[in-house]
């Protein structure tokens, strides 16, 4: 009988731990007064593949390993506006070289 009681007690403890672990989001005044524009944004790396090779046919296509990719991979170059102030900000245009800042990831 005590064996079953210990098992039930262990399951109850596990369930309460799992239920409490799910509450990671803010609520109440903290969530109401949150300023999302002041939080750092998550960055993602964008990859491109260049497929220049001819497609395989016949036994070579059948025996090709899917995880071995023969394509060239490139990282995307992101552009972002420069934060200018004063007359430089007033007179700037996108076609000028001082408008964009390139970032490589």
Image (cartoon, rainbow, N blue to C red):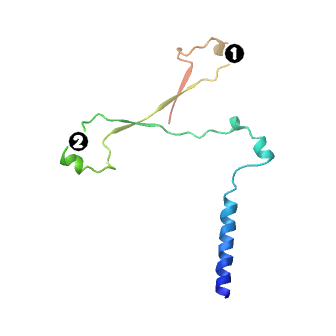
Q: In the image, 33: left or right of 21?
A: right
Number of marks in the image?
2
Which residue is labeled 2 in the image?
56
Residue 72 vertical position relative to residue 95 in the rendered view, above or below = below
Identify the residue position indicated by label 1 in the image.
86
Of residues 74 and 14, the one nearer the viewer is 14
Residue placed furthest toward the right:
29
Furthest toward the left, the residue is 58
Q: Position of residue 98 (x, y in %)?
A: 56, 18
The one of 70 and 55 positioned closer to us in this rendering: 55
N-terminal-most mark, 1 or 2: 2
On-image quarter of the N terminus: bottom right
- Circle 1 sits in a helix, a strand or a loop, which is it? loop
84 versus 3 height, above or below: above
Residue located at (62% from left, 38% from top): 41
Q: Residues within 10 Å of mark 1 (few under 14, many from 20)?
A: few
Q: Position of residue 105 (x, y in %)?
A: 50, 36
- The quarter of the picture where residue 94 lies is top right
**Mark number for residue 19?**
none
Secondary structure of the residue carrying numbered label 2: loop
Left or right of residue 104, residue 91 in this image: right
> Relative to residue 47, is residue 90 depicted above or below?
above
Q: Nearer the viewer, mark 1 or mark 2?
A: 2
Tag 1 and tag 2, C-beta contact below 8 Å: no
Residue that appears at 68% across and 66% down: 17
Residue count near mark 2 (Cα–Cα under 10 Å), binned few <14, some 14–19, many ≥20: few
Q: Position of residue 12 (x, y in %)?
A: 68, 72
Determine the residue located farthest toward the bottom in the rendered image.
Answer: 1
Task: Tell whether 91 sits left or right of 32.
Answer: left
Residue in the picture at 23% in, 42% down: 56
Q: Residue at x 68, y 19 (%)?
A: 85
Q: CA distance from mark 1 to mark 2?
A: 58 Å
């Amino acid at each position: 009988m005590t064996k079953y009681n210990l098992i039930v007690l262990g399951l109850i403890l596990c369930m309460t731990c799992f239920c409490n672990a799910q509450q990671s989001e803010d609520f109440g005044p903290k969530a109401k007064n949150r300023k999302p524009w002041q939080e750092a944004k998550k960055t993602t790396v964008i990859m491109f593949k260049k497929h220049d090779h001819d497609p395989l046919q016949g036994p070579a296509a059948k025996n090709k390993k899917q995880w071995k990719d023969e394509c060239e991979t490139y990282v995307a170059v992101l552009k972002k506006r420069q934060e200018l102030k004063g007359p430089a900000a007033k007179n700037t245009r996108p076609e000028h070289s001082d408008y964009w800042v390139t970032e490589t990831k």
